[in-house]
Structure formats: C-alpha cells, structure tokens
Image: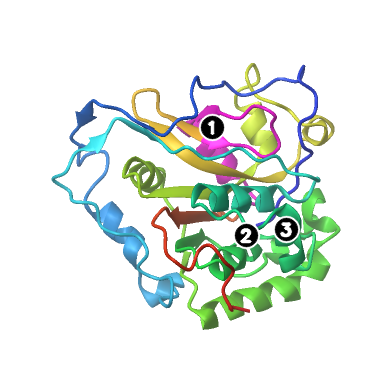
Amino acid sequence: MKYFCVAATNENKRKRKPIKSDKDITSQTRIPWNSARLSASVVFSLKGHTEDEGVSNGEHSGMVEPYPCEQPLPCSHFVEVPHINQQDSWDCGLACVLMVFRTLGIDNCDIQTLAELCHTNSIWTVDLAFLLRKFSISFSYFTVTFGANPNYSGETFYKEQLPNDLERVDNLFQKALEAGINIQRRSISREEICFSILSGKYIAIVLVDQYKLSRSSPDDVFVSDYCVSNSGYTGHYVVICGYDTTADEFEIRDPACSRKNERISSTCLEEARKSFGTDEDLLLISLKKSGKQNRPGTHQ
C-alpha cells in the first residue's frame, strides 16, 4: 500500500514503448461495447457495495456516474495529463497527485507543498486520498485491505517502515471512514478500469510493483537502479490516463521515467498492480471540475 522508486536519470536505460502524441485524443471510430466483455453491472458496481465489502458512503461516495449502456464507447481514449517527475525516491505518489491537479487546472501548489501537507515521507495510498479530499477532488478508493497489512513485515520493502506506520495508517483509515471518504474494500477489475477510462470521465492513480512492471516488457521498459539490485516487491505509483482497445494497452504517466508518454499492455498492468504488497490499491478520480478545486479545503 505504499511506494518506493528511484527516479530515472539515465537516458540509456531501457524505457517502455512511447506513444506519438500527448494530446487528448478520442478515436473517431466508435464501437458498441459488447456486453460479453463488459456487462452493464460493471458501471453500477463502481457506484456502491454492501457493508460487508467495507464501503464508506459519504461526502465523496457515489462519485462514479452510470454510463448509458446503449451508448457506444470509443475504441480508445487518451487524456492529456502533464508529466511530472518525482524529486526523490519516496515521492512518486505526490508527483502523481500533482499530475492530477494540473490536469484539473489546479496550479497553486507544488510537490514540496504536498509533502508538507502529508507530514511524512512514508506515503501510503490513504495519504494520497486525503490530499485529493483536501482539494475537493471527487474519487473512489479501491483496496483489498483496510489499514496496514502486518503480513508485509517480511518484505524487504516494508521491513524498515512498517512497524512505525501500522498505527498511523490504521488511524488514517478510521478517519477516512469518519470523513466520508469513499473506500471500497475490493479489487477493481480490469474491465472496470477500461470502461472508466473509455468513458472519458476518469483517470486513475494506481499502486504497482515496479519490478514486475519492468520485467513484463524487458525490451521496452525503464529499469531503475533499485529494481536491478532487488528482485523483490518495489512499490511505485503511476497515473493511468488512456486506453486503446485494439492494442489492449493503457497509456500511463510514470513519475520515475524521463519519457513523457508510455503505453503498457493490460496484462502487464494487471500483474504489476496485483502483486503481493500493493493491496491492489487504486484511486479512480473524476475529471469533473468543481469551483472548490483551485484551493485546498478546510478538511483536516
């Protein structure tokens, strides 16, 4: 449920396959979305779940709007998300939040400001959720684990910080419920992610195992120094901002990579985001702007 990544600095290191344009593009060829691939229940499953699944329905709940089943989805859709590099090994999540802010027209803060608001350099997805809430951004938070998972204590990546983070993270989750943050205790499916991106209404911040993301396409991907020396779990955040059904590829923004636009296969993304250590965390963020988004709110 947290990150670590060494930022890319060497142009000679391998990178993921680039795309040719970073413009907001929607394919002009539209196709009906086959119900065999994505049933109508998918979009409504995003909207709410039972109490057994750990859903918090409050201020930000019900964020995901139903997409008319009879309305065809585009073959592809790409949102113009400004690429921002992380500044340190620990702030990839903050860089992703900042990319979301810039996409929504919020330009009155920088990555240092976000770091100060977090009061820690051990950033978990719930920390990012509170940053989004503070700036009145609508989102849904998907995770298979409520709180910090003590089973990760054996992972090299978590070993140093987890003992100190357990209580803090558990308290943040409890505060999130009390604050009405929409947390759905389940994994969001590949089909739901594709549907949401193709609808043109959402982008996402996703926690991945960077080692697996790199290993899945060894000829095209950037491999950080950390990944080279450690084949274990390496948490890292990226932004999902596009999807192409023909190629079955997602467009992402990776704050650790010097290349602005990258595409990865859906299979690669699935393996990386469902790795042990990620809790399958994903923040599905609405692109609908509100008047409150240009300044931080009063939420604590």
Cα separation between marks 3 and 1: 23 Å
Identified at 30% across, 28% down, the residue is 27
Q: Identity of the amino acid at label 3? A: Tyr
Cα separation between marks 2 and 3: 15 Å
Range covered by the magenta-colored residues: 252-278
Q: Identity of the amino acid at label 2? A: Thr
Going from N to C along the chain, the mark reached first, 3 or 1, is 3
Q: Label 2, on which residue? A: 125
Between 264 and 135, the one lying in front of the other is 135
Whether residue 155 can be seen here: no
| Residue 80 screen position, x and y as percent | 47, 37
Q: Is residue 252 left or right of residue 245?
A: right
Identified at 23% across, 47% down, the residue is 39
- The image's mark for residue 268 is 1
Between 190 and 202, the one lying in front of the other is 202
| Residue 181 screen position, x and y as percent | 50, 73
Q: Identity of the amino acid at label 1? A: Cys
Identified at 83% across, 57% down, the residue is 159
User: How many numbered circles are shown?
Assistant: 3
Q: Label 3, on which residue? A: 152
The quadrant of the picture occupied by the N terminus is bottom right
Disc 1 crowd rating (10 Å Cα; few below 14, some 14-19, many 20+) is: some
